[in-house]
Image (spheres, grey):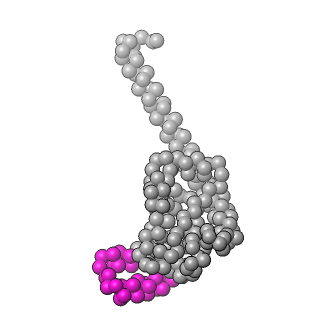
Amino acid sequence: TPGQIEAFTWSASGSIITEALASAFPTVLVFCVDTVRCASSPNTFMSNMLYACSMMYRTRLPLVVAFNKIDVVPHDFCVEWMKDYDAFQEALDDMQASDESTGFHGSLTRSLSLVLDEFYRHLHSCGVSAATGDGMDEFWTVVDSAAKEFETDYLEEIKNRLELQKAKKKAKAKQSMDKLQRDLAKDTGGKDI
């Protein structure tokens, strides 16, 4: 849900949790998208893709987009929109022709689709049904692939970030200790204590 996304993606605690997990285990994020809602509006699809993009870039971890409810609506159109910029533009044209919403929102969605075209190339996706279990074998295959990507493409960067954080923490502790010693020296008139 959006509240959970905010809590885990943009809060300090979310960063702490994902970094702790990623430093100990192969870590993959899964973002579940309501395929039925995406089918009703390309704008909803775009909103979901923006959430996915923000999660992936904020956490710097592999991400799997699981299009749920494929027992109700197949997710093929979502995959097509991700792979074919023109197909998404046509869907926007159809939506705008039917409800005449050609204002700012439509223009923004068109621009974002161009920007996210690159993002889709680094995204793992699959279709699943929580109700019937359809697509679960493919889901686990995609998760395994993302976990391998974690090992090859993300792990070294995570180790480097953790080492940098350690070094910064150590430097800050030394700076604080030096300041404390200076302050104590002032208070004692330069006498050792």
Coordinates of residue 183 in the picture (x, y in percent): 38, 21
Coordinates of residue 106 in the picture (x, y in percent): 35, 79
Q: Nearer the viewer, residue 117 or 131?
A: 131
Residue for point 60% across, 59% down: 28
Residue 27, image quadrant: bottom right
Residue for point 60% across, 74% down: 127
Left of 189 or right of it: where is 56? right
Residue for point 52% across, 74% down: 35
Residue for point 65% across, 65% down: 143
* Residue sticking out furthest to the front: 131
Residue 92, image quadrant: bottom left
Question: Can residue 152 be seen in the rendering of this structure?
Answer: no
Q: Examine the structure image and report whether residue 84 is included in the region drawn in magenta.
A: yes
Coordinates of residue 24 in the picture (x, y in percent): 64, 48
Q: Nearer the viewer, residue 68 or 152?
A: 68
Q: Give the range drawn in magenta.
A: 82-111
The count of marks equals: 0
Q: Examine the structure image and report whether residue 181 is included in the region drawn in magenta.
A: no
Question: Can residue 186 be seen in the rendering of this structure?
Answer: yes
Task: State whether the magenta stretch is mostly helix, strand or loop.
Answer: helix
Picture layout, residue 77 above or below residue 119: below
